[in-house]
Amino acid sequence: MSISVRDLADQPHLRVEVLAGAAGLDRSVTWAHSSDLPEPWDWLAGGELLMKNGRTLPRSATGQARLIEGLARAGAAALIIGTDPDTPAVAARVTALADRLGLPVLRVPYSVNFIVLSRTVADALIHEESRRLARASRIYASIRDGITASDPARFLARLEAELGCELFVIDSGTGASVLDGTPPPPGPVRDELLATLSRRGGAVPGLLRADAGDGQVVAVEVPYEEPTLLVARRPGAGDQPFDLALLQHAATAAAVEVAHASLRQDHHRQLGTELLAQLLDSRLDAASAGRQLAARGLDPAGARLLAARGPADDDQRRLHIGLHRRHVDHLLIRRGGVVLILLAGTGTGTGTGTGAGAGRADETVALVRGRLGGDSAVGVSNVLGDALRVPEAAREAMWALAVAAERPDGAAYYGGAAPLPALRDPAEAQALIDRALGLLLDYDRRTNSELLRSLAAFLDCRRSWQRTARRLSVHRQTVVYRMERVEQITGRRLTETADLAELWLALSAYELLTGARLLAE
């Protein structure tokens, strides 16, 4: 059983007065809803009876007209005004507008409670609510089917059959489909949705409408860690409203399917992480490295390595999802507080910021900084060129990262500047590390000691035994002993200015190329 606006107006106990829009009295009412929002139409799916009292009804004729126009666009069944001492008069041009749009404007006296109106509508829709619950149950049953079959297209088709419309699950930033094997919405629909979101600063209301000139198009937010939309489309003309409650149920079901698909991608990401680790540690020969990179869509001729650092803790997984959604082939790993990304390119060469796939790198820099936060920094290497050049490219990216950290835009390409004026490139930095700290690093690896960290703390604390002891949480005499061992192993004297300068510069270079934080923990 359904109820129309006319049915409500004809019930004597409600004492409804029709002010305007009588041509729309036969509209069906899907729900009765009160709201004090200035733009309530963003939370309406169509067919709602919107109830407003005097305190929330716009006082100006312009505001009232905007309310009527917004409700008409949203397909509301009617506006009903509850009179009270603060209720403003409805302007004559507003009633004329409601007549022209066919939107009923009703009034009830102060003594008629909105609860009575809501119960009247709810009682009339009890049978419809029972049908909605059954449909919601079938929507959630589709989750089990989708996970069991591992077939996103089949899952989405089942939802479409239940809701009676086309459905698309898309990324809010790009409009691309996020479920493998399912298409994105038509170009004009996608473009209008993205433009509408952009005008709203990316915020998604209860119901996002797109006027693409081809039937009804609405979207609701999918509750997932990455911005995602469920888009519903009915091609052609028609005034059948979308059921917002069922759309929200479908969005929740879509979130489960997206999360399940993400778990499958996680396995792929972990394999890629292991491959990048092998490349960084030079554990693969040229033939094997080239073959495995090609299998992942990565051509060394155009690939670059990015090094990024930021405050976000969950950056690695979110970066992978963001790149995957943009169909960017990549490998990703976190080492020493730095995220390293081997990124597919679009060309060849060894440019330092233009050409050679720099456009793709620029897009990824923007994505990475967006995921890591405003204080993040990203350094970009030269083009890889050779699969075995990954360790060198990582040093280039780290070199550029140090420059990026000092720039307002937080991004830099290798070759743009030198982070340590005394050193011209990573090769010189590595040579200094090997010469000044090589034996110390080797000793720490063999004995599992912390002489390098202790030396960094000692220099950062201005060679104060007491401050260094507090920094390291050890006894003062332990610091003295460790610094004696440092002098013995490195052959440098911590009382000689030249030796101190060399050790400080070597530690700075070590931080730069490895991403370690030693001198300012």
Image (spheres, grey):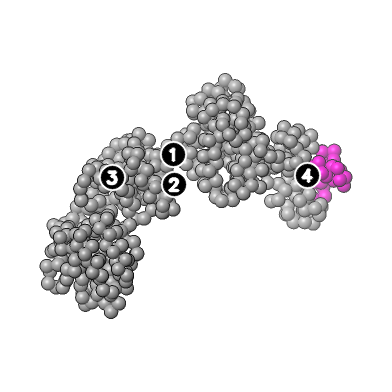
Residue at the spot 12% in from the left edge and 69% down from the top edge? 11
Q: Is mark 3 on a helix, strand or loop?
A: loop
Pointers 2 and 4 in contact (C-beta within 8 Å): no
Q: Distance between the residues labelled 2 and 4?
A: 42 Å
Could you tell which of marks 2 and 4 lies nearer the N-terminus?
A: 2
> Which residue was labeled with disc 1?
325
User: Helix, strand, or loop for circle 2?
Assistant: loop
Whether residues under marks 2 and 1 lie with C-beta atoms below 8 angstroms apart, the answer is yes
Specify the amino acid type for callout 3: Gly
Question: Which stretch did the figure color magenta?
Answer: 479-504
Q: Nearer the viewer, mark 3 or mark 1?
A: 3
Relative side of 117 to 329, left or right: left
Helix, strand or loop for the magenta stretch, by majority: helix
Residues under numbered marks 1 and 4 in contact, where contact means CB atoms less than 8 Å apart: no
From the image, tell me which residue sits under label 2: 226
User: How far is the residue under mark 2 from the one under mark 3?
Assistant: 29 Å
**What amino acid is at disc 1?**
Arg
Of labels 2 and 1, earlier in sequence is: 2
Task: Pick whichever of labels 3 and 1 is earlier in the sequence.
Answer: 3
In front of the other: 264 or 104? 104
Residue 147 to residue 345: above or below: below
Q: Which residue is drawn at 78% across and 49% down?
A: 459
Q: Can residue 146 be seen in this view?
A: no
Which x, y percent locates residue 275?
55, 30
- The numbered mark at residue 504 is 4
Give the residue type at disc 2.
Glu
Question: Which residue position is annotated with label 3?
Answer: 213
